[in-house]
Amino acid sequence: MNHDFAELRDEGHGVPPRALVLSLLALAIPVLGATIAPEWLSGDRGIVLWLTALIPPFLLTYYRGWRGASLGLAFGMAVLVLAHLGIVASGAAAPSYAVLLWVTGTYIAVCVGAGVLAELLRRERAVAEELALTDALTGLPNRRHATIFLDTAFAAAIRGQPTCVVLFDLDRFKGVNDRHGHRAGDEVLRRFGKILATGTRRMNLSARWGGEEFISILSQADPEGAAVFATRIRERLREEEFEWGRITVSAGIASYSPTMGSPEVLVATADQALYAAKEAGRDRYRIAGAEKPPAGTRSDSGFRPGPEAGEVGETPGEADRRSGRTAGEGDFKALPRGIERILVVDDDEPVRRGVTAFLKKLGYEVLNAPDGRRALEAERGSGKTDLLVVDLIMPEMMGFTLGERFEEEFGPQRILYISGHVQGEVDWKWAPGSAVDFIAKPMSAAALAEKVRVLLDRTP
């Protein structure tokens, strides 16, 4: 697997051989002393040799990473030695060595026990963190992990590192579940996950994106190299034979471009290519950007996130409130308004509801849908929409693919794409739509109202 959590968890917590040798020598000192000079060992000075028995638990706790336990043992060793030296130097009466032995043994047990408990807690936390970033069925990193990795890879791409994204989708997977049951479907997902895990280099990452969709983030890869990778994965899956037969997979490939500005644009572009591969007959790959980009207009030269950008998921106006600005009634009345029909599509319910309610307050007729399929159904049932406001990353059908479907079925479209994780200027000429703009989460009320009005005033 490209990320072995068990290896990461245990790294640096083993006890090296030299520490074991030192422990054996430390234990041998009092044993040899008792054998060679038992009279001297039983005297006042002999207790110093017995203190070497504290060295093995100290080394154990130190190399296992139990910092508190090792510090406690080191402190205890120092106190016992200094106290004994003070007793010998002052000529005071020797303490009861039976009591001293009991106290020392108890102290060691408490320190080591605390270390063991800390280790168990650390391991439980590591397991919880692993589960939070791992898909339980396939063992691959999950979507959350992929998103974190993608943000980092996109930042590296901005600095000049070639980066590609490959989206895989198992062909006719729903039919497998319907005809052979969900156990058969789970077995397909597990085997494909294993193929991806073994076929992905450690510097890259393959993850389960959701359902039967998987993503591979490839660093230092150009589209041709990503195509070789996708072909290898597809061929390996074709060799897998299940009790009921075989299954294939389609792939969409997109490479980083400076005009994307957001990793979500990169993924949505790969989804466009994946949709093209499915439309072309499945069991194949397509590379985004292999042809001339569509001739469309943009509402401006591009989008760069303003100072209001922050946490993803805020609804219109929350960015204003978070920055300390409060919009009064006069500010709201000053926002551009209209009466056109707008369709809002976003799988994030709070954002979808917030955008819908805000645009209705501006006078627009607003419909909304949680995914692409229901957005298409709403458009077929309600008539022509003047503006499509759509989130870029959604399950089943992402924003660019939905925009493409709308143009194919309903003609030229005005589209406002919502994107999170914006890291630069978004001016992606491949975005479907005849009049297109982008807005970042979180969005301010003024920015949303302005972009909607500008787009509606353009002729697609």
Image (cartoon, grey):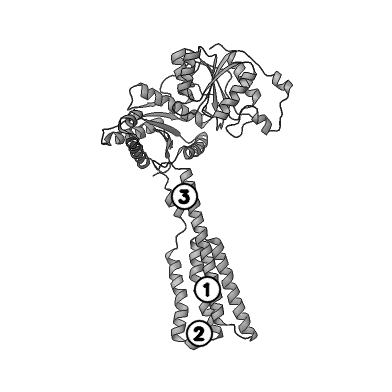
Residue bearing mark 1 = 105
> Residue 318 appears at what percent x and percent y?
65, 30
**Front position in the image: 28 or 179:** 179
**Amino acid at the residue labelled 1:** Gly
Q: Secondary structure at mark 1?
A: helix
Mark 2 vs 3, N-terminal side:
2
Q: Residues within 10 Å of mark 3 (few under 14, many from 20)?
A: some
Near mark 2 (Cα within 10 A), the count class, few <14, some 14-19 or many ≥20, is many
On the rendered structure, is 451 left or right of 132?
right
Q: Secondary structure at mark 2?
A: helix
Q: Residue 41 got which mark?
A: 2
Q: Quadrant of residue 68?
A: bottom right
Q: Relative to 199, is 224 above or below?
A: above
Of residues 261 and 268, the one drawn nearer to the viewer in this rendering: 268
Q: Is residue 41 above or below residue 114?
A: below
Tell me, yes or no, if residue 287 can be seen here: no
Residue denoted by label 3: 127
In this rendering, position of residue 161 left or right of residue 324: left
Q: CA distance from mark 3 to mark 1?
A: 33 Å
* Residue at horizontal 47 percent and vertical 78 percent from the top: 29
Q: Which numbered circle lies on residue 398?
A: none
Q: Position of residue 371 (x, y in %)?
A: 48, 25
Q: Amino acid at mark 3?
A: Val
Closer-to-camera residue (122/90)? 122
Q: Residues within 10 Å of mark 1 (few under 14, many from 20)?
A: few
Q: Residue 47 in the image: state x and y as whole percent.
A: 54, 81
Amino acid bearing label 2 = Leu
> Which label's residue is closer to the chain start, 3 or 1?
1
Marks 2 and 3 sit apart, C-alpha to C-alpha, by: 48 Å
Secondary structure beneath label 3: helix
